Structure formats: structure tokens, C-alpha cells
Amino acid sequence: MGSQADTADVEFKLLAEQIHRIGTIVTKLLQFSKPSEYAGHLDQQDPSEIVQDTLPLVQHLLKKTSIVVEKQFSATRLVAVSKGEVQQVLVNLIVNAIHAMPEGGRLILRTLDAANAAGKPGVGIQVVDSGTGIAPELIGRIFDPFVSTKQQGGTGLGLSISQMLMARQNGSLSVANEAGEGAIFTLWLPEDQ
């Protein structure tokens, strides 16, 4: 690309990060049969940066919609996590939110300092959509395998896998219907492992 290489700097960075992410996924698949011998690599991460770095991964989908993305980053704590696994969960939640708003709407991505139910300090990462919310009869089963709110194309495994990935990070994933509109998914991650 010669002198024009600087214009694609963001794309090159994204490409390099995704090649690394693919390498990590392949390594995990190769080591899947020996889970006791594999321990995920954890790094201190800024949760707001994780969310910011996830947006380019779904930008191609967002461009096709009239969804307004609002970022509300107020977390001050760092978390020790596998960035790739947290991004995998965020991509799933953002894609689900996009599907929940076919006519457009508002997508809020929020980070905040938060304690879990036991009072342990950590960080909450929230994905809030202005869709129709989750039917009351499904909300208690939404993380069960093969449960899907999508009329077609959904396997019902994304949220189940996402919840498992959060448990591996010593965190949690929960859902609630937002008063008067859409759903709010909250990832909670401990401040330290």
C-alpha cells in the first residue's frame, strides 16, 4: 500500500488482534480434550477498553442498521481476565441486541464499578437494548442450552456458552428487562482473581 498504509492503520491493528484471537481459539480447541492441563491466560485489563476494542468486530452489522450506540464508561477498576473470552461474550450480546432492534433503536454499552451479591468488588459491563425485552416465560430459562428468542437462525447456544465463559473468568452473566423497554445484560467480573 506504500504511502497509503497509514490510512488503514486501524484495520491492520484489528487484523493483527483477530489473527491472535484465532490462534488462541485454535489452541483452546487443540487442548479441549485436556482441560485440567489448560489454564487460561489472565491479564489486567481496563473493561472500558475491552468494550471499545470489541466495537470494530460488530461495526459491519451496526452500519446496516439505524441503531445509535451510546457509550457510558465509568469503571475505574481493572479486572484480571482473558480479553478474548470477554470479547466473545460481548460480541454475542451485541449481535443479540442488534437482532432485538430490527427497526433500529438505542444500544447502550456501559461499564461501572460494582460489587457482586456477596459484596466482592469488581466491574459490571452492561449491554442494554431498546428492543421489546425478553418474554417473562423465557427470562428464567434464557441461559439454558437450545433456548432462543430468535424466530429463525438461532441455535440457542450463544447465551449458554457466554455464561460458561463468564464463570471461567470467576464472573457472572445476568439479564433483566429494562423498565418500559428492552433487555439489559450484565457481565460482572471480579477486580482481582
Image (cartoon, rainbow, N blue to C red):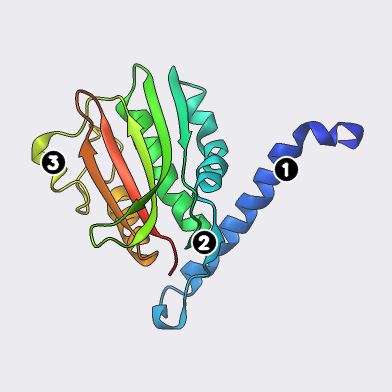
Amino acid at the residue labelled 2? Ile
Query: Tags 2 and 3 in contact by the CB under 8 Å rule?
Result: no
Q: Nearer the viewer, mark 2 or mark 1?
A: 1
Kindly indicate the quadrant of the structure image that contains residue 133.
Answer: top left
Which residue sits furthest bottom? 37
The residue that mark 3 highlights is 138
The one nearer the camera, 105 or 8, is: 105
User: Does 112 appear above or below 130?
Assistant: below
The one nearer the camera, 60 or 173, is: 173
Q: Residues within 10 Å of mark 2 (few under 14, many from 20)?
A: some
- Give the distance between the C-alpha atoms of the residues marked 1 and 3, in whole angstroms: 41 Å
Amino acid at the residue labelled 3? Leu
- Give the distance between the C-alpha atoms of the residues marked 2 and 3, in whole angstroms: 31 Å
Q: Quadrant of the N terminus?
A: top right
The residue that mark 2 highlights is 25
The one nearer the camera, 108 or 146, is: 108
User: Does 103 appear above or below 45?
Assistant: above
Mark 1 secondary-structure assignment: helix
Q: Residue at x 30, y 28 (%)?
A: 100
Query: Tags 2 and 1 in contact by the CB under 8 Å rule?
Result: no
Find residue 20 and report its horizontal and vertical position in percent.
63, 58
Q: Earlier in the sequence, mark 2 or mark 1?
A: 1
Q: Residues within 10 Å of mark 1 (few under 14, many from 20)?
A: few
Mark 3 secondary-structure assignment: helix
The residue that mark 1 highlights is 12
Q: Earlier in the sequence, mark 2 or mark 3?
A: 2
